[in-house]
Image (tube, grey):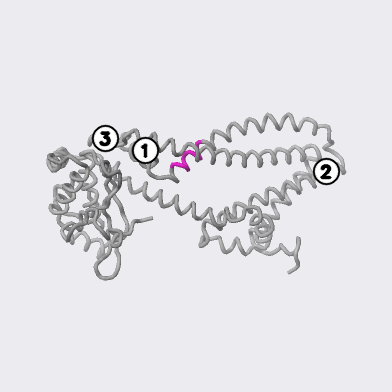
Amino acid sequence: MNSGLWGAVDMNLITWVLFIIVAFSIYLGFRRGASGSAKQLLYFLLHAVFTVVALVLSALFASAASPHLQSWLSGKALDLSKAGSSWFAQLVYTVGSGMRDLTLLRFAVLFLIAHTVIRIVLGILTRALGTVVTLPLSILPNGGVVSRAIGGMIGAVLGAGRALLFTALLFAYCALFPQGPMTDYIKQSSAYREAAAQIIQPVAGTLIEAQLPVFAEALNAELNQLWQRRYDVVDADLPEDLIQAAASIVESKVTDEAKARALYEWVGSRITYDDDKVTAYVEHGEWREQNPEMTFVTRKGVCIDYARLYASMARTVGLDVRVVTGLGYDGRGGYGSHAWNEVYLAEQQRWVSLDPTWAITGNWFDSEGFADTHIKQV
């Protein structure tokens, strides 16, 4: 196929959308005339420049503020309030601990806050500056053949800018979702391929195509970790006998490690694995949801119930703990869905992994090779 304008024509919907954007901009430019079209182009350029400025300033702010926010949150002792605290207090803990521990999530939140504020300020500046700068353009004529022809040419430039912006968004989508439902179809558009190859890739380099998917994957992994902390909120309302039991178990323990290990041994030895619950789910698709109180009373549960009970009891005695989901070795050469815990030992300043479900089979508290049999969900 020939290169140039006609070489970019095909029956792909994306191609026609790009051409329609340009054509409609030319039409509007023709209607507005030279003066109106020039003003529109100037506003578009101001908006584009300020968009880039807002992104750069937001990123710089987030990078600079992130370590200070982490330090501040670390000094706030975000231990979960005792059972019976309000739903809001539980939510504050979950969000606060997530912001403290998850680097990309903290950066993303700071970036969005800064970007919102900066865009509001720049939006006001755009309108004020645009009014002043475009004032001399008012002397250009809006009527007549020459004026409308100039307006059409300016509209073509404006349309090309809009089409290029649309192409950049499509390019980012294809980079983020290489197996997405529309990715292959988008790449079949000759107009998209031409713009991406000639403009987007040379300008952006590997920033979009290579770095954006890596950033998105890392952020998604952190969001999954935050989602797992939902149990901090949903399991916050605990009965008094469970709270007293946890206090009694760690009564003579001083260090975080001693408390965490005592609770691990208690849950691992007192709770029985519920094979009937597994059978009901595997054979009939029936999931019997239960909270830590039910597990504590019935003394039965599956891995997620062990983990939720352990986490609930640990939090009532002041330990920072979380439920972890992923895959566990099944002993037959494969892996299956599993859940366990991580607890923070303040005196050692580190998180350790433990699996109360497997406690009856050996030592699974901060044991060597734990990561060889447990794969965290990311």
Q: Which residues are magenta?
A: 106-113
> Taking the image as drawn, is residue 178 in sight?
yes
**Mark 1 = which residue?**
96
Residue 32 location, x and y as percent?
78, 40
Residue type (three-letter) at the residue carrying disc 2 = Arg
**Mark 3 = which residue?**
81
Choose between 32 and 318: the one closer to the eye: 318
Residue type (three-letter) at the residue carrying disc 3 = Ser
1 or 2: tag closer to the N-terminus? 1
**Mark 2 = which residue?**
148
Q: Residues within 10 Å of mark 1 (few under 14, many from 20)?
A: some
Of helix, strand and loop, which one carries label 3? Answer: loop
Choose between 299 and 67: the one closer to the eye: 67
Of helix, strand and loop, which one carries label 2? Answer: helix
Residue 147 location, x and y as percent?
85, 41
Residue 189 location, x and y as percent?
64, 62
| Residue shown at the point (76%, 67%) measured from the top left | 2
2 or 3: tag closer to the N-terminus? 3
Q: Quadrant of the N terminus?
A: bottom right
Whether residue 308 appears in magenta in the rendering, the answer is no
Of helix, strand and loop, which one carries label 1? Answer: helix
Rounded to the nearest whole Å, what is the CA distance between mark 1 and mark 3?
13 Å
